[in-house]
Amino acid sequence: MILVTGATGNLGKATINSLLDKGIAPSDITALVRDETKAADLISKGVQVKLGDYQDVESLKNAFQGVDKLLLISSSADIAYRFGQHKNAIDAAKETGVSHLIYTGFAMNDLHQSTMGEDVQYHAYTADYVKQAAIPYTVMNNTLYADLIPFLIGKDALDEGVSIPAGAGKTPFLPLADMAEALAVVLTTPGHDNKEYVLAAETAFSFAEIAAMLSDSTGKTIAYHQPAGSLYIAQLIEAGLSADDAAYIARYAKAIAYGEFDTGKSDAKHLLGRSPVRLDDFLRNLYGE
């Protein structure tokens, strides 16, 4: 039995779909959710659904009964709670006899020393904890989703230009679908025990290069603007984010500018058995040009 936490989120849902595409029977997949009403599409596909909350250890123990492989997708709760919630899930997995735990970490050069501080350090604490838990594990360190690019650069990028204060920093953006497929591979094939992988593209690109890709695909001249941090935050708020969330995203832009995501590491091709989708192709498809 495979159990996927965070199953109604983007990565969880995409991973379950990838498992189904690989021929895994719906009855062999369990989706852990907090709200069953949000899992109607999974239930319609025959996927089992169990209720569980990272804050409620007993609910996790009940949900993990009979689970062989557990995909622990990192929590989306307030930052201060995330490591504690992950610890609860890891402890519950150990107590219930889960045979393989896969954790979705974060791919940066140094999580402990990142300019983002507590925003990302919990990933390092979780990875360290799972390695000490005496459960066969795989840590999947994910880069930023390519799917986030339109959100990061502004909704009117094709008309007003790419707008993000990310300097010349480069990021090896990887499409969510490729990340999900790689996770499904690890969940369904042997040889991944006690290993750590980086899910990232083989090539990192700056936002100036992304603007050039958009220029090539649209036939327009797409400029790259680097607004001051306060103006970028205002841009994000105008797009619908809260002030706190906008400030959080702005810290990502700063980390990109400092080159913190440009690790030079990628296991995506090895896991997928093919090259990941190229960023220029992804953007051309995304923007419909």
Image: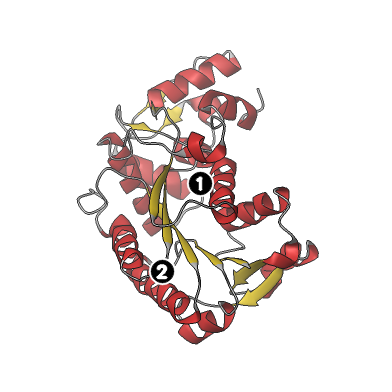
> In the displayed image of the protein, which residue is found farthest to the left?
113
**Residue at figure coordinates x 39%, y 67% from the top left:** 78
Name the quadrant containing residue 283.
top right
**Residue at figure coordinates x 28%, y 40% from the top left:** 260
| Whether residue 50 is situated above or below residue 279 in the rendered picture | below
**Could you tell me how many numbered marks the image carries?**
2
Residue toward you, 122 or 249: 122
Going from N to C along the chain, the mark reached first, 2 or 1, is 2
Residue toward you, 100 or 148: 100
Question: Is there a contact, CB below 8 Å, between mark 2 and mark 1?
Answer: no
| Whether residue 14 is situated above or below residue 205 in the rendered picture | below
Instruction: Point out residue 32 in the picture as x, y percentages from the top left corner.
Output: 60, 71
| Whether residue 68 is situated above or below residue 271 in the rendered picture | below
Would you call the spot at circle 1 few (<14 residues within 10 Å), some (14-19), or many (20 or more)? few
- The amino acid type of the residue labelled 2 equals Ile
**Residue at figure coordinates x 41%, y 36% from the top left:** 266
| Whether residue 128 is situated above or below residue 143 in the rendered picture | below
Residue toward you, 37 or 150: 37
Instruction: Point out residue 210 in the picture as x, y percentages from the top left corner.
Output: 45, 25
Q: Say whether residue 87 is left or right of residue 67.
A: left
**Residue at figure coordinates x 54%, y 32% from the top left:** 276
What residue would you read off at disc 1? 239
Residue 271: mark in rendering:
none
Residue 47, visible in the rendered structure? no
Instruction: Point out residue 183 in the picture as x, y percentages from the top left corner.
Output: 54, 51
- The amino acid type of the residue labelled 1 equals Ala
What residue would you read off at disc 2? 135
